[in-house]
Each structure stands twice: as C-alpha cells, then as structure tokens.
C-alpha cells in the first residue's frame, strides 16, 4: 500500500464524519457503540486489519467510545493507508 502523503484534506473529501486534526496532518473521528463489548469487538476487527497492513491507529477507548487518530508516521502525514483504514473503520462500525 502506498505511503505517499496525500494530506488530510484529500482524505476528508472521501470520508464522512471525520475531521482534520488541529495541529498535525492527521484525521480524527469519535466512534460510539452500544456498550463496551461492541466497542472492543470493533477494535479487534480493526486491529486484525492493522496488523495485515502494518499500519496501526492511535486510539483510546472508554466504555462505549473509541477516539481514533490516523496518520502515517514515516510519511509525517495522511496517506492512502490512512484512507483505507478510515473506510474500513466506518464500514465495520455500521
């Protein structure tokens, strides 16, 4: 997968509910689930893809909420990897 930097604005043009981070080239979204079990199950599905892609999100979980930040560290910004991960997260959350 391509690690060429595309930037947050280009990624956001293809996503819904995501926003640009305030101080770095990254995209962020807050996901809310029915309960902790649903949130953790979603995180597990995302983690399996992240391992396959060798691309891991920054995230935190409190009960039914998961806060996500995506940016490709070795590109110092948003790449196609982040866009693919964001689309997968959205689909898995439906």
Image (cartoon, rainbow, N blue to C red):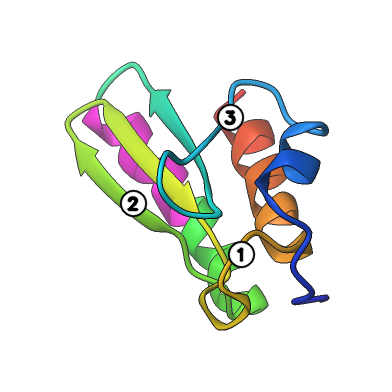
Above or below residue 25? Residue 31 is above
The residue singled out by tag 2 in the image is 59
Secondary element at image label 2: strand
Q: Separation of disc 3 and disc 1 at Cα?
A: 19 Å
| Magenta highlight: main SS | helix
The magenta segment is 36-44
Instruction: Residue 15 in the image: state x and y as whole percent.
Output: 74, 31
Q: Which comes sooner in the sequence, label 2 or label 1? A: 1
Instruction: Residue 63 in the image: state x and y as whole percent.
Output: 17, 30
Using a 10 Å C-alpha cutoff, classify the residue at mark 3 as few (fewer than 14 neighbours), some (14 to 19) or many (20 or more): some
Quarter holding residue 79: bottom right
Q: Decide: marks 2, 1 in contact (CB < 8 A)? A: no
* Magenta stretch contains residue 87: no
Figure quadrant of the C terminus: top right
Rendered image: mark on residue 58 = none
Q: Nearer the viewer, mark 3 or mark 1?
A: 3
């Amino acid at each position: 997968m391509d690690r060429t930097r595309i930037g947050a604005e280009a990624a956001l043009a293809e996503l819904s509910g995501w926003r640009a981070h305030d101080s770095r080239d990254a995209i962020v979204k807050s996901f809310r689930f029915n309960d902790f079990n649903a949130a953790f199950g979603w995180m597990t599905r995302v983690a399996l893809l992240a391992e396959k892609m060798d691309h891991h999100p920054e995230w935190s979980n409190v009960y039914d909420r998961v806060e996500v930040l995506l940016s490709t560290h070795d590109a110092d910004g948003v790449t196609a990897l982040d866009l693919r991960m964001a689309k997968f997260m959205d689909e898995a959350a439906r």
